[in-house]
Image (cartoon, grey):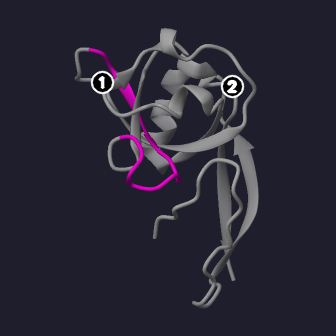
Amino acid sequence: KGTNVAPGQNFTCNTSGPVTARISGFKQIPKNEKTMALYVATYGPILVGLNAMPFETYIGGVMSATSCGTGPVDSAMAIVGYNMEAETPYWILKNSWSTSWGEEGYAFLEFGKNACDIDEMAFTAFAAKI
């Protein structure tokens, strides 16, 4: 389920169900967008660290690399897919700020130009069944 947590707020996970797995490790994905895309296609979503400021006013469309600006990494989003068939290829990012943000909780960010330094902090986690 999504959360309605604004940037900078804390939240508590719902742990009403049984715990069936634990995070057993993590791995940084190489700093290369094509490698990241291959990883997403093969294994599923990855997490990326980004500066949240350019995304605070995002309402839709493909955000260009030039609109990112600079700033510290202070937020994380999940890359859940990409579209290479579009006129401007883009990443599909899922945010936790609620479905009222962006396009139903998603953002589209230009692919192939390291927009918002998207390849600087890309990670995946490994889970171990309990």
Q: Give residue 6's position: percent from left, percent from top.
A: 59, 52
- In 3D space, how far apart are the residues under numbered discs 1 and 2 (Cα atoms)? 21 Å
Mark 2 closeness class: few <14, some 14–19, many ≥20 residues within 10 Å: some
Of residues 110 and 45, the one drawn nearer to the viewer in this rendering: 110
Residue 84's disc number: 1
Range covered by the magenta-colored residues: 88-102
98 vs 29, left or right, is left
Q: According to the image, label 2 marks what residue?
A: 120
Position above or below: 7 against 70: below
User: Chief secondary structure of the magenta span?
Assistant: loop
Of residues 107 and 80, the one drawn nearer to the viewer in this rendering: 107
Position above or below: 72 against 28: above
Mark 1 closeness class: few <14, some 14–19, many ≥20 residues within 10 Å: few
Q: Amino acid at mark 1?
A: Met
Q: Secondary structure at mark 2?
A: loop
Measuring 58% from the left and 59% from the top, which residue is drawn there?
5
Q: Amino acid at mark 2?
A: Glu
Q: Give residue 127's position: percent from left, percent from top.
A: 66, 66
The answer to whether the residue labelled 1 contacts the one labelled 2, judged by CB atoms less than 8 Å apart, is no
Q: Secondary structure at mark 1?
A: loop
2 vs 32, left or right, is left
Give residue 108's quadrant in the image: top left
Position above or below: 56 against 110: below
**Sequence order check, earlier mark of 1 and 2:** 1
Of residues 88 and 25, the one drawn nearer to the viewer in this rendering: 88
Quadrant where the image shows the C terminus: bottom right
Measuring 51% from the left and 39% from the top, which residue is drawn there?
39
Give residue 12's quadrant in the image: bottom right
Q: Give residue 126's position: percent from left, percent from top.
A: 67, 59
